Amino acid sequence: MQRSLAKLAVYAVLSVGLLLTGRLVVGEAPAGPPTPPTPATPATPATPAAPAAPAGSAAPAGAHGQANAALLPQGEYLAHAADCVACHSAPGGAAYAGGRGMGLPMGTIWTTNITPDAETGIGSYTLQDFDRALRRGVARDGHHLYPSMPYPSYAKLSDGDVAALYAYFMLSVKPVHQVNHPPQVGWPVSMRWLMAIWNMFFLDTHPYQNARDHDAQWNRGAYLVQGAGHCGACHTPRGWLFEEKALSEHGSGYLAGAPLDNWSAADLTGDGAYGLGRWSEADLVQFLKTGHNASGTAFGSMIDVINYSTQFLSDADNAAIAHYLKSLPPAHRDAPQTWQANPASAAALNQLQFGARGSQLYYQYCGDCHRRDGSGQAPYIPPLAGNPAVLDSDPVSLINITLNGSSPLVVAGNPDFYRMASFRGLLDDQQLADVVTYMRGAWGNVAAGVSPDQVRSLRTTTGAVQVEELNLLRMR
């Protein structure tokens, strides 16, 4: 029923768009909008010089005359900030060669090869071609990209930062000859030209402009979060047509948390229960730099963000991101804004009283690491008492990590020693539902229970984490 309604909504919007344009036909690639004037660019912090490009990665002579080698350090830094390698690299594959499948409501698409290979990558792209793809969502041959490539966020990048990214990809990334996978999406979404109309409604083509009523640190954080970091692509709820409901703090629902490929991307606003309301700016900086703090540990796709992106940002930029996020008001004002610890659950476990659903399973399998009082062992084993991910109104992340385990965090080249194990083979659906329900209702936590059907559904569509051998230098 929901899919049918979604299709009707698509038809309605597209019909209006066709009436408004009066000139689009099937297969026609509309001209890209003019490049806007360069805004004041938030300062990019000084970074160490990029190492020499590996043998064989240089572009053919004359092919990339617009790529400025002086911009390589800035471009590499921005590629980290944008976390390009995480999406555009398949597990075990070459950096930036694409091939990573992304599950979407309308089917599956695979990320593309963005190495400077002339035949299968972006080696033939001019700076203008690169800019048009990055900030307008239109490839060199005129076909439209789907917004799973977060060009609505990258549209906020400055001209100077786009030029720096172009230099990095053309002059420093090793070309890889790897043909792209065609997307597997159903009609009518398979007709890419429809994205031209989608863009009319949902793409803001104006680069970021500094807010005069905020200081330089806030503006730098806003630029990184809204632009290169594209945080909203995961953490902002989407509408019927897969559009982010807001692209900045001026819109309702911005960074309010959203479902994401069998996870729940966290609420990044000031919500006190399952947002960042109880975190300090220092807590956020520690999390962005290491993936851990006293309140939680990165999981799901956020592990890639830590492994390939935020740990490489300067302390000043991570502080700016934290400063900006902590300025956001609660997105769910009707939700609980406080959390109060309750010692009754721990007291019952200490007395071997297992009357609460799932309590004995927790005592047997979880208590040694996460403690009987749910306090964990910070910073590496997170607390469950008061943890925003445990209190989330959507329990899918807690089910997923308990069912499938967690990938390793690798900071400064060192994999973390403690990580969540998979209980997929040890607990059945009822048992896993019981222990997750216990965690969501113990120690002062107040969140809805979980059913075996919810566990069963996730079990059939996911698998235990397969630990990939990580090489954090694979960007080059």
Image (cartoon, rainbow, N blue to C red):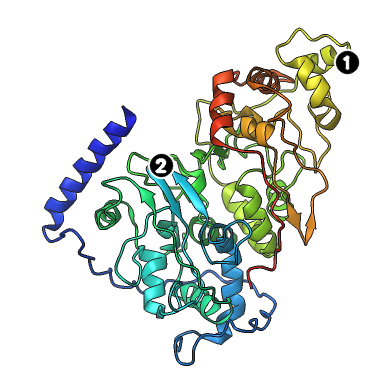
Regarding residue 62, the answer to whether it shows in the image is: yes
Would you name the residue on which mark 1 appears? Answer: 350
Seen as rendered, the residue at the extreme bottom is: 61
Query: Which quarter of the rendered picture does the C terminus lie within?
Result: bottom right
Mark 2: give few (<14), some (14-19) or many (20+) Cα within 10 Å.
some
Q: Residue, x 46% and y 59% (percent of image)?
A: 211
SS at mark 2?
Answer: loop
Q: Position of residue 348 (x, y in %)?
A: 83, 12
Q: Residue, x 29% and y 36% (percent of image)?
A: 6
Q: Quadrant of residue 141?
A: bottom left
Mark 1: give few (<14), some (14-19) or many (20+) Cα within 10 Å.
few
- The three-letter amino acid code for the residue at tag 1 is Asn
The one nearer the camera, 233 or 56, is: 56
The numbered mark at residue 402 is: none
How far is mark 2 from mark 1, CA to CA? 44 Å
Regarding residue 373, the answer to whether it shows in the image is: no
Indicate whether 243 appears above or below 167.
above
Indicate whether 19 appears above or below 40.
above
Q: Position of residue 393 (x, y in %)?
A: 55, 27
- The three-letter amino acid code for the residue at tag 2 is Arg
Q: Position of residue 425 (x, y in %)?
A: 71, 29
SS at mark 1?
Answer: helix
User: Would residue 381 be found to the left or right of residue 186 on screen?
Assistant: right
Query: Which quarter of the rendered picture does the N terminus lie within?
Result: top left
Q: Position of residue 203 (x, y in %)?
A: 33, 56
Would you name the residue on which mark 2 appears? Answer: 238
Instruction: Determine whether label 2 and label 1 are within 8 Å by CB.
Output: no
Q: Residue, x 44% and y 87% (percent of image)?
A: 63
